[in-house]
Structure formats: structure tokens, C-alpha cells
Amino acid sequence: MINWINYIVESSLVLGLLLLFYRAVLSKEKCISYNRYYLLFTGGASIIIPLIDLPFSLFQKSIVQFEPIYELPAIISQVTTFSEPQNNSLDSLLSFLVFIYIIGAVVATYFLIVKISKLIGLIQSSTNTMDGGNFKIILTNGRMPSFSFHKYLFLNQINKTEEELKTIISHEKAHISQKHSIDIILMEVYKIVFWFSPLTYQLVKNMRLNHEYLADQAATEHIDKKTYINTLLNNIYANTISGMVHYFGMHSTEKRIRMMQKSINWNALYKPYFSIPFFSILFFTFSCHFEPIEVLPTTIGNETTPEAIKGVMSNFRLENPSRTYFFKFTSDYELEKIRASDFGNYTIDFVAQLKGYENSYGIIYSFDKHRTLPKEIFSNKLYSLQEVTQIPTPWKGYEELLNKIDLNASQYVSVSEDKTIWVKFVITTIGQITFTNITGTNYSQMTNEEAELYGAAIKAINATNSDWRVGKINNTTVNVELELPVRFYKQN
């Protein structure tokens, strides 16, 4: 029901661990070209890896799954296929969180559109331009600092020496030729999806700093490092116009200077290779999931356990001689857990997928060997709807149940005019329908037509057997008498 929350948690863990590895192993080494692709890969991996679902049985067979949850006693063998009732308070919370997420994504999208529109406006309104070959230089005349985006270089030429201009142009040209703007756009889109995570902004920060390292490295291949550093120190900017562009003197000047002064050593050569086994561990940790073993379907009982898990049953009996173990199969494992919450001392000890049957499971369940079954299960005492504290309700609600009853009724008999028959019945302490009767009817005087009609009404009600959640009085399950209409409609 809330798989998307699991996705967010796993995605955040993948991102956090990859960033931790980057900071601890790679960030201070001069393997900056590799680091660019590592950071891009980090964003992509945090999105994709949690979506991959590799069955663990590809790598290891016969995985047994145990869950300490409640299960129904041996006398219940009905296979049910009804969905889990919803928790209104949880649904409300989840709906609120989804609403907050959507608002955040819309706001982040709006800011991205504003940033792009502002840049487009600057480009279109610029009149003082120069052709730089593969890029275009736009002179800002001191109105804004030097920066680059895509193939446009905005150059603040005021109070700059020819040497400083050459240095700035060389740096921004590196950003353009290495297509760093593509990385920035990808990061901005990533921020829209994961706007709520602080790790997202750390990833973007690391990417921007890496771009500066790369541009500094490219520029200092043609310019003296001392001259380059002096120019960098003389052009530190405090004010910017956009978070999407590359400013010459904006990002972590001290770190950039230290990186420029480093030389490539053995650490920078071999440390990137550590990321391969690290990623492999992450991949298999977050994408491989345990898959229950497959067994052939069989009937419920003590001696009909499939051969594949008879050893498991034997181990249970040896380890817990005070409990009785049974095997059964079900088409709705989640619903079995919910229904079992009405009982005590019954647990599911093992679950396995049924071979050849989609969404079907075999389970081993147990209960205390020395415990007598609850007396109320066999009680014939009936309670009215007004007496119970928990009213019996259909798993999928009354509207769907009544539609199902009417549909079933129309399949059993045809009528010449619309009719409504009221049927009285009892929901037992185990959610079964018994004592189904037509309200206020003298059966000894009914006609053949009435008998056919009443029989169809009773069949329609009985077809909803096990559609019901039990009734209770002070947390004790009881037999409750109900009355519902069965509607027959004239066929057109």
C-alpha cells in the first residue's frame, strides 16, 4: 500500500551511501574527470536501483520466510480473495504527504522555469556581443559578474586587465566545451523529483564544485597557475543572478586553489576502482529481494504438507512440541493476516509461493496444543445489531456487497417485475454466514414461483460467505443477526 515510501527510503539510502563514499574516498583526490561521471551516476543510481527487483533465488535457492503474525485455527479452510480494509487515519496521512510532495514539486518546477526564462531574457536582450567561435560572448558592462551557460559566455569586462580577461574566458570556455550545463539541467530536474531531501542539494553542490575543478584544470593548461589564482582571488563574487550558471569566482575558492596545487598521484589512479565493488554491494543489497520457495498446491491438513517443506514442518514440531502445526493454501496472504487479528494464539510460521499459481501461497500455521478453541466459535447464541460494539461489516463496503448480491440474484432467476426480498442471516464468530432465511415467510404455504425466488435470494446472500468481518462485544467475537435486501430487476 505504501511501496512509494519504501522507494523514497531506499533511494535516499543509496544516494547517502554513494555521497559518503565520494566524500571519504574521491572528493579530495585529483581524479576529477572520473568524479564528474561518478556524481552523475550517483543521481541516476539513486533513482533506478530501488526500482530493480531481482529475486534472491537467482543467487541462492530455498529461502524460507518467517513472520510472527496471527493466523486462523484449523477449522477454517475457506480460500478468500478479498482486499485489505483501509486504515482511514493512515490513508489521510498518506494523502496529506502526497499533497505536500506535489506542492513541493510544483514549486521546484516553477523556480526552474523562472531561472531558464531569466537566462533566455538576458540572452535576447543583450546587444553588446562578440563571436567566440563555438560560443558567443555577451559583454555585461559591469551589470553582472562573469559566468557561462550553454554556449553563452557573459563577460564582465569592466576594470579587468587583458590578462584577467584571458583567464576568465579560458575558464568559462572550459565549462562550455565540456558541456557542464547539461549536468546542471539534469541536477535541476533531479531536484524537482527529490526536492525534500537534503542529500539532493549536497549532490548538486558537489557537482558544481567538480565543474569548477574541471574548468580550472583545463584553463591552467594554458595559463600560469600563479596568474590564474591571483585572477581568481580578485574576482570573488557575493551576488549572483541564477543558480543554474557557472560563475568564475563563486564556488569554494579555497578548495579550488588547493585542488589546482595538487598533482596526480597513485591515490588518484587507484581509488576510483574502489567504487566498483562498493557499487556492486549497493546494487545487490537494494535490488535483490528474498523470494519464497515454490511448492505444489495441496489441501489443508496435518498430513498433506508438500514434500518440499515436510522437513520444515518436522523441524517446527521438534522445536516447539507444545504447538500443533497445519498446512493450508490461500490466494490472499495479506487478508489472512488481517482476519487472524480477531483471534489469539494462532501464528503463521512459514509462507511459500505456490508453483504455477499466481498470487497464491502455502502457509504453515500453528496454535497451542493444550489450548481449547474459543467457546464462542461453537456458540449458538445470537446477538442483535444493537447489542454489539463492533458491527459486522463487509471487507469492501456495503455498496459493493449489495451490488454483488443483486448481480448474483439476477443470475439465479428471472423476474417479470422488479422485486425486493429481505433475507435474515447470521454472521458467525469466524465470519461465516449461517441460518439464512427469508424474513416473515411461511414456508409451508409458498408457491413454486416463490420457492424459486426465495431460493435465489438465499443463494445470493450465501454467495457472500467470508465477505464479512466479524462482530464483537468488548473485543469478544460473537454471532450477530443481520437483515439485507436482495433486489431482483426485470430484464429488458
Image (cartoon, rainbow, N blue to C red):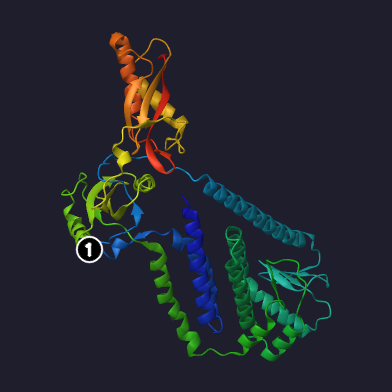
Question: Which of the two residues, 128 or 254, is positioned nearer the viewer here?
Answer: 254
Which residue is denoted by mark 1 in the rendering?
Answer: 319
Q: Is residue 157 above or below residue 408?
A: below
Q: Is residue 328 above or below residue 395?
A: below
Does residue 87 appear to the left or right of 345 in the view shown? right
Q: Residue at x 52, y 76 (%)?
A: 20
Q: Is residue 329 above or below residue 45?
A: above
Q: Residue at x 37, y 44 (%)?
A: 339
Q: Residue at x 45, y 85 (%)?
A: 270
Count how many numbered circles sit on residues in the image: 1
Q: Residue at x 83, y 73 (%)?
A: 142
Helix, strand or loop at label 1? It is: helix
Q: Amino acid at mark 1?
A: Glu
Does residue 87 appear to the left or right of 79 in the view shown? right
Q: Name the quadrant of the C terminus.
A: top left
Q: Quadrant of residue 62?
A: bottom left
Does residue 228 appear to the left or right of 449 in the view shown? right
Does residue 137 appear in this view?
yes
| Mark 1 crowd level (few <14, some 14–19, many ≥20, 10 Å Cα) | few
Does residue 178 appear in this view?
no
Question: Which of the two residues, 163 or 65, is positioned nearer the viewer here?
Answer: 65
Q: Position of residue 209 (x, y in %)?
A: 63, 76
Q: Position of residue 166 (x, y in %)?
A: 73, 81
Q: Position of residue 442 (x, y in %)?
A: 33, 12
Q: Quadrant of residue 153?
A: bottom right
Q: Is residue 330 above or below residue 348?
A: above
Q: Position of residue 227 (x, y in %)?
A: 72, 89
